[in-house]
Amino acid sequence: MQRNLGKLVVLKLGPGSFQQGFSVTLQIGLEGERPTLELPGLLPPVSDLPGLYQQWQMAYRQLRLPSRLEAQPDMVTNVSWVGDCHDSAERLCDRINTWLSHPIFQPISNKLLEQLSPTDIIRVVLQTEDPILRRLPWHQWDFFQRYPQAELALSAPFYQQVNAPQTLSQTVRILAILGDATGLDLETDRTLLQNLPGVDLSLLIGPDRATLNHYLWDQQGWDILFFAGHSGGNVGKISLNSQESLTISELKYALTKAVQQGLAIALFNSCDGLGLAEDLADLHIPQILVMREPIPDRVAHQFLKGFLESFSRNTPLYLSVREARERLQGVEGEFPCATWLPILCQNLAQQPPTWQGLLGTQQMGEAIDSVHRPWIAAVGLGVAMTAVTLSLRFLGGFQSLELAAYDRFLRWWPWFETPDARLVVIKNTEDDIKQQGLDRNSEFSITDDTLLAVLKKLELFQPRVIGIDIYHEHGLDPALPELKERLESMPNVVSLCKHPSDAAEMGGVAPPPQVRFGNKLGFSDFLEDTDSTTRRLLITIDRPPESPCPADYSFATLIAGQYLSLMGASDNLDDVFWQDTHDQFQLRQVRIPPLNRRSGGYKLASADGYQQLVRYRHLPNLEKIADTYDLSEVLSDDFEGIELRDRIVLLGTTSLSFGGGDIEERDFWKTPYTNSERLEDMTPGVFIQAHMVSQLVSAVEDGRPLISTWNEWIEICWITLWGIAGGAMGWRLSTGRLGLVLLTAEIGLLLVCWSLLALPALWVPYVPAAILMSGTAITVSRYRD
């Protein structure tokens, strides 16, 4: 069964008066911890309240019930006085609740409702020096009806902690003083104490002062000091026997020693004990239980029986007092206002003891401090939730969510980038295909004579690299030997082929069989994730032996490498593109961070080849990556082509209809910037190639970072740290504040992850960290409550 720490509510009633009102300070926090909330407020003037209290007190004392007040002659109770007592009690309660419902006090009341739950165990401590405020029946406040596990105690404004030694005893040591028994039945008190289990009871019956003083100085110390007999008066006097009485001040040194030796509770089952409580509080006794008015003998017995039964079952001290006090309602027909009499007085510097704690079962290594024990369980919850979250991520449970978040971060890029001035795209459009006498069912989208014309025209304009992003697997027209010659002899022309999409599939697209391409042939294979989105670039591939495509490097990689080699001192591709000693590819001085099976949010079944995340240029439209021209425009006599000099020129088909009825055969692709599955919203493959080429060249020439990820262990630490943060929030913050702080933390996490991707291009885990932080915070908070 989970342990409930409980809440501590402190109401400090500061300077003021019933005529001018009182200042109020509310503090709320967990037991054993610093307050998590402090709120100042006011109580309005209520000048008639002291008079109403005094009327009730007079009516109660006129009942002349046989009580444990200083021994008095027998008195007779008038039946009409009972009615007067009930009426004055009702008027007093109504006035107290009206006072505490005043709009001026409403901010305090609202905060209590906001921060507390009816299921909470609540210790309410009232700090005030005003004698009338201390005597009011605060338990009649409507607040205590709403919160059935709350109980009130009084506290002095000044208190001090006493560091008592831990007891090694396995019993509860009780020093019981049965004082002057004139007119009283103290034998019942004695029997109730003797029947308690696990008790080391020392009984002093009618002792003299010297004997009591001797016992209080016992070196073993006492857990509970009990007194039954006659007492009363504002001076806090108790009757030890029929001849001898003494005040608390006359036992000052002995009681101080008892507190230092571990005295935890002083229970005075006698009359008019608030005077006693004030004197005892000066000695810093942790818990003092007294009766605020004269108490009938039978009521004293019934309360003691109920309290001891409840407290010895290890019910919290405050709830034990409330339970025993409320049981007295059964005798209020005969003894009016019996439930008003018991009151706790608390040293706020001390934690209320439990019966098991007094027994010593929470001592030494057998038990851990009550504050630390729940911490261990809370840490266990956090560890379990972290393990579950990391396991789910390891198994790919968050992959779709992480990829969706990654796409969102890309679309939230804080600024638009400029097109890449090094690139030009020539589009083979629908009209261009029709002008060549081809249609949607043709096997290819460009004729040999058109391709030859384009190459001849482009050669005049001297582009740095020409990439032909069009398949040509059926061989060249024998009537055009010049085309074969140009494809082989032009050093800046890169063509493409395609590997099978599956190792078991006999597919792929071969290059023209009669052309010897050398290192000018790249593969066009794109990688699609399970949601059909293209986020990854293949640098190299583990070429299947049955593949018709002999290329080892991707089309975009070869074009970028060709461009950079021709721009440098060497025209050898190997001088600008190589693998280092860690088998990581470098393009000139730039390392290309590899993407493996478990990089970032990916949890792939395999990651064949050398993969890299595509960092698309952030543009209003991905097709704005470069200057574009239609094929017919380039071939026209009016095209001067000066703007193509020293640039990368890509030629590709952008027709929506080419490829026949099979949509998958069409060269259109979904990207992180695509919000629909419609073909019209997808991006032509030649523009995807342009972005891939651009990211590699820009990384070398412009210092534009490539997207990278942490290694798996750093990601685990990152996620775990956010889980710890969530657990700390759930433990430390009240339920009311947790929602706002958690929302702020989630927004902060989102901004951190987005900023890291936007600036240094680092993809860090957001989804598992956010889920773990929220889940841990909420779970720990509910456990704590």
Image (cartoon, rainbow, N blue to C red):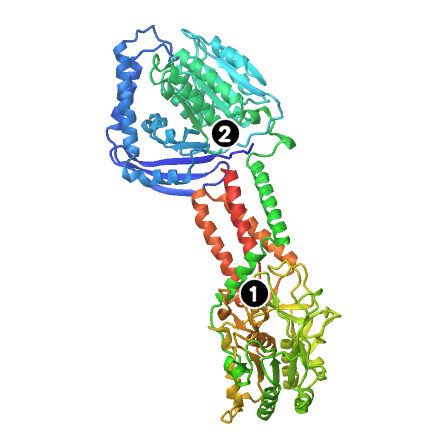
User: What is the number of callouts on the image?
Assistant: 2
At label 1, the amino acid type is Thr
Count neighbours of disc 2 (C-alpha within 10 A) and say few if under 14, some if 14 to 19, many if 20 or more. Answer: some
Q: Quadrant of residue 509?
A: bottom right
* Residue closest to the eye, 369 or 547: 547
Q: Which mark is residue 352?
A: 2
Q: Quadrant of residue 460?
A: bottom right
Residue at point 29%, 21% (across, down): 89
Closer mark to the observer between disc 2 and disc 1: 1
At label 2, the amino acid type is Pro
Residue 475 on image: x %, y % = 68, 82
Residue at numbered disc 1:
533
Numbered disc 1: secondary structure: loop
Numbered disc 2: secondary structure: loop
* Residue closest to the eye, 258 or 39: 39
* Residue closest to the eye, 646 or 294: 646
Query: Which of the two labelled residues, at mark 2 and mark 1, occupies the earlier sequence position?
Result: 2
Q: Is residue 412 left or right of residue 689?
A: left
- Which quadrant of the figure contains the N terminus? top right
Residue 301 on image: x %, y % = 44, 13
Residue at point 53%, 74% (across, down): 657
Residue at point 60%, 34% (across, down): 368
Q: Which mark is residue 721?
A: none
Against 454, residue 163 (above or below) is above
* Residue 287 in sight here: no
